[in-house]
Amino acid sequence: MTAQVITVTSGKGGVGKTTAVANLATALAADGKKVVCMDGDIGLRNLDVIMGLENRIVYDIVDVIEGRCKLKQAMIRDKHYPDLYLIPAAQTRDKNAVSPSDMTRICNDLRPDADFVIIDSPAGIERGFRNAIAPADRVLVVTNPEVSAVRDADRVVGILEAEEKGSPSLILNRLNPTLVRNNDMLSAEDVLDLLGIQLIGIVPEDESVIIGSNRGAPVVTDAKSRAGQAFRNIAKRLQGQEIPFMDLEQQGGLWGAIQKLTGRK
Amino acid sequence: MEQITSLVQIKGIRDGLLATFSDAPWEDQYLSLLAQIGERPAFFQGARLAIDVGSQILKVNDLVDLRDHLSERNITLWAVISESPTTEHTSQLLGLATRISKPRPQEKTHVDAASDDTALFVNKTLRSGTRIEFPGNIVVMGDVNPGAEIVAEGNVIVWGRVRGMIHAGAKGNRSAFICALDLSANQLRIADEVSAMLKPQKDPKPEIASINSEGRLQAELWHTG
Ligand SMILES: Nc1ncnc2c1ncn2[C@@H]1O[C@H](COP(=O)(O)OP(=O)(O)O)[C@@H](O)[C@H]1O
Ligand SMILES: [Mg+2]
């Protein structure tokens, strides 16, 4: 086994990075993969809360780096999936407690025993972001169909290209087909046209995401949720499967455009 | 200590301070610069700093680290001068200037600067946060995305879509022009004229923007010949 390290980032805050990490990790574990997710948002940890693991934390990533515990001791096992682990961020330290080489080292230690390591990144393009992308084999950029979020995503894509991290894949989160139809929201086509990167999934705006987060049960575990389905599909694509895109919009125009755009490399 | 601090030379220039790096390893010089700042905090306090890094190849991490350390000390890194295209690219990505005006005894008449025939050729899409400045013409093969900026003393030609900011004739040349396959820029400037917002078109055609006989910045269809 040698894990693929995937970092989820965005530039702008609040677009759904942590939600994506919790859901993709859970969906991959549900597919029988061995998954470790890491919270890279030092000082503002919340991946543990969304996964419902907050009260199990004893050690965190800074304890590992500073030698107060072994890596295994900081890996919290999920309540439902025995092959899903979380390495929490430190809540009371700042991001300078971690360096890009610490992240690379920890990931290298995790690689032999996992299929996927998924890293949640903080907002911004400063130290915490650079820590999160340092070990990445693959980067997923999350954005919302909103001008400011797309502009920040564009900036992050430029930096990833300069860092020779390869071209990232895009998760377009919180798309609302009704708003798009009424021309009140950027369409998937507008976003893809500007960013010019490969689309790996569109997640609709869905209140069950918020309900799931509050319950500490990521929405992928809800079989009826549209957002859950979208995240399950992305998890399958990460495993190399060809899964057709969900038809969020019954109208032909947008749909045709997405198919056309995802065909381009 | 003496040895370390002499790695980086610092002097005052018109635009603030200029630190000139040698070819010694980047880490050493970086520490040397921080050491010099530590020795004379009052001198550096609030300064605008440009660095000349010679042929050092610097990545985003290197420059962001330096910029963070400097800003903690209340020093603004605004320009990076380099012989390496990689370093220059990195600086542009971070929105840092890559050229500084040389100290000169007298302001020379700036109008002739753009009659210079040199052009900078940029063979990629410019993403948000990127700023490219050049004392001649600039040619871009790619798009100029929202949040990207191009500043040329001469003309600007974009073989792609313009949605960012372009300033041609930046030193005052009112006969400079901007042309692009799709000129739905969020702002265009020529010399000191600023365009109103141009509406994105459904079916864009190549356009050229220039200052018309009434002295206003105006875009029209781009006919060659
Ligand atoms: N597809 C979605 N539909 C509805 N709400 C969402 C969706 N994705 C994320 N959210 C909500 O948006 C907020 C921010 O998400 P979060 O994952 O914490 O963002 P980030 O980690 O990028 O800061 C949370 O309240 C989350 O529940
Ligand atoms: Mg988050």
Image: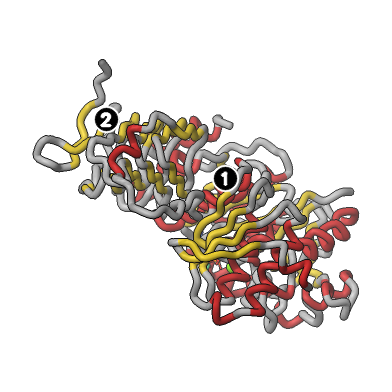
Percent of width and height locating residue A188: 44, 44
Choose between A242 and A42: the one closer to the eye: A42
Q: Which chain's residue wears label 2?
A: B
Q: Quadrant of the N terminus of chain B?
A: bottom right
Q: In what element is the residue under mark 1?
A: helix
Q: CA distance from mark 2 to mark 1?
A: 28 Å
- Asked whether, in this view, residue B185 is left or right of residue A201, the answer is left
Residue at the image position 83 percent from the left and 63 percent from the top:
A106
* Number of marks drawn: 2
Mark 2 vs mark 1: in front: 1
Q: Which chain's residue wears label 1?
A: B
Q: Residues within 10 Å of mark 2 (few under 14, many from 20)?
A: some
Choose between A82 and B142: the one closer to the eye: B142
> What residue would you read off at disc 1?
B89
* Amino acid under disc 2: Glu
Q: Is mark 1 within 8 Å of ligand 1?
A: no
Choose between A33 and B102: the one closer to the eye: B102
Residue A189, picture quadrant: top left
* Amino acid under disc 1: His
Percent of width and height locating residue A118: 72, 58
Residue at the image position 49 percent from the left and 38 percent from the top:
B125
Percent of width and height locating residue B8: 67, 62
Do discs 2 and 1 belong to a common subunit? yes
Q: In what element is the residue under mark 2?
A: strand
Q: Which mark is residue B207?
A: 2
